[in-house]
Image (cartoon, rainbow, N blue to C red):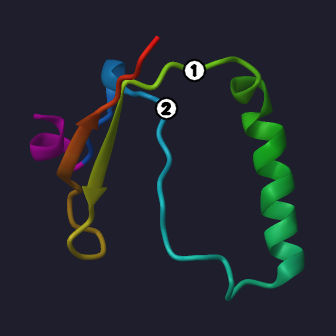
Amino acid sequence: DHVARWGYPRVFDDWRCHLTLTDGLGDLDPARVERILAEARVHFGPALAEPAQVDAIAVCVEPAPGAPFQVRARVPLGGAR
């Protein structure tokens, strides 16, 4: 429902930790990439210090720049204990 209404699956109380994959950073100046990485480490460090439970992986696509995201697949995860 969120994808249809807002163009993104995780909004408001349904927000979950997620990673957005995009084109590489290869076209950026290496010094700028290092600054981005340093800032990301500081910003995300506290959250990454705690273990996280991942129960599924969802693949969302943006069919065109600026278009609403669409869920392409959702794969539940599980494992032997």
Q: Which mark is residue 43?
A: none
The mark total stands at 2
Measuring 72% from the left and 36% from the top, which residue is drawn there?
44
In this view, 6 is above or below 38:
above
- What is the quadrant of the N terminus in the image? top left
Write down the region rendered in magenta: 1-7
Measuring 79% from the left and 32% from the top, which residue is drawn there?
45
Between residues 62 and 76, which one lies in front from this camera angle? 76
Q: Earlier in the sequence, mark 2 or mark 1?
A: 2
Q: Amino acid at mark 2?
A: Cys
| Residue at mark 2 | 17
| Residue at mark 1 | 52
Q: Residues within 10 Å of mark 2 (few under 14, many from 20)?
A: few
Circle 2/circle 1 CB separation < 8 Å: yes
Report whether 6 appears left or right of 81: left
Q: CA distance from mark 2 to mark 1?
A: 9 Å
In this view, 25 is above or below 4:
below
Element carrying mark 2: loop
Give the quarter of the image for residue 56.
Answer: top left
x, y percent for residue 25:
66, 77
Report whether 20 appears left or right of 63: right
Measuring 23% from the left and 56% from the top, which residue is drawn there?
69
**Among all residues in the image, which is located at the extreme front?**
80
Residue 66 among those drawn in magenta = no
Report whether 46 appears left or right of 47: right
Q: Amino acid at mark 1?
A: Ala
Between residues 79 and 23, which one lies in front from this camera angle? 79
The kind of secondary structure the magenta stretch mainly shows is helix
